[in-house]
Amino acid sequence: MDQLCVVTTVVDARSVADLLAAAAVAGRLAACAQVGGPMDSTYWWQSRMETTREWSVQFKTAPDRVEALVDHLRSSHPYEVPEILVHWVESGNPDYTTWIHDQTRT
């Protein structure tokens, strides 16, 4: 139970970030979610370089909840092609990883 996952995404409004965070935690898809920003992102979209103010959301979850969390983010995210990145954390504070696991049970 030492493993956990950090799933990240970005959105263009703090209110949307807060909603995604709250829905994932309320649904036990993540034990916690942290919203950070604003930050400016520069990227290519539809053959143009764009710069957008965005907010990042980091979700801490158990490995067996990743697929459900990613599915939830894909269906609720306002972007046509959302950034959803999954980072596998091989080990961490055992008490914390146990807490993550326990909080993602229904």
Image (cartoon, grey):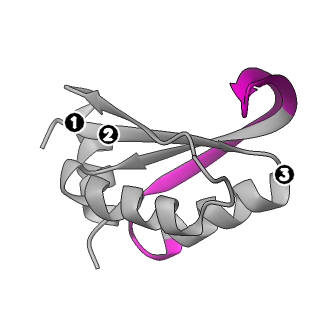
Label located before the other in sequence (1 or 2): 2
Residue visible at 51% across and 68% down in the picture? 75
Residue 27 percent across, percent down from the top left? 44, 76
The front one of 66 and 60 is 66
Residue visible at 55% across and 39% down in the picture? 83
Q: In the rendering, which numbered label is found on residue 13?
A: 3
**Which quadrant is the N terminus positioned in?**
top left
* Residue type, mark 1 in image: Pro
Residue 26 percent across, percent down from the top left? 51, 75
SS class of the residue under badge 1?
helix
Q: Residues within 10 Å of mark 1 (few under 14, many from 20)?
A: few
Q: Is residue 61 above or below residue 7?
A: below
Label located before the other in sequence (2 or 3): 2
Quarter location, residue 90: top left
In whole angstroms, how far apart are the C-alphas of marks 3 and 1?
A: 34 Å
Q: Residues within 10 Å of mark 2 (few under 14, many from 20)?
A: many
Label located before the other in sequence (3 or 1): 3
* Residue type, mark 3 in image: Ala
In whole angstroms, how far apart are the C-alphas of marks 1 and 2?
A: 14 Å
Looking at the rendering, the stretch of residues picked out in magenta corresponds to: 26-52
- Residue at the front extreme? 47
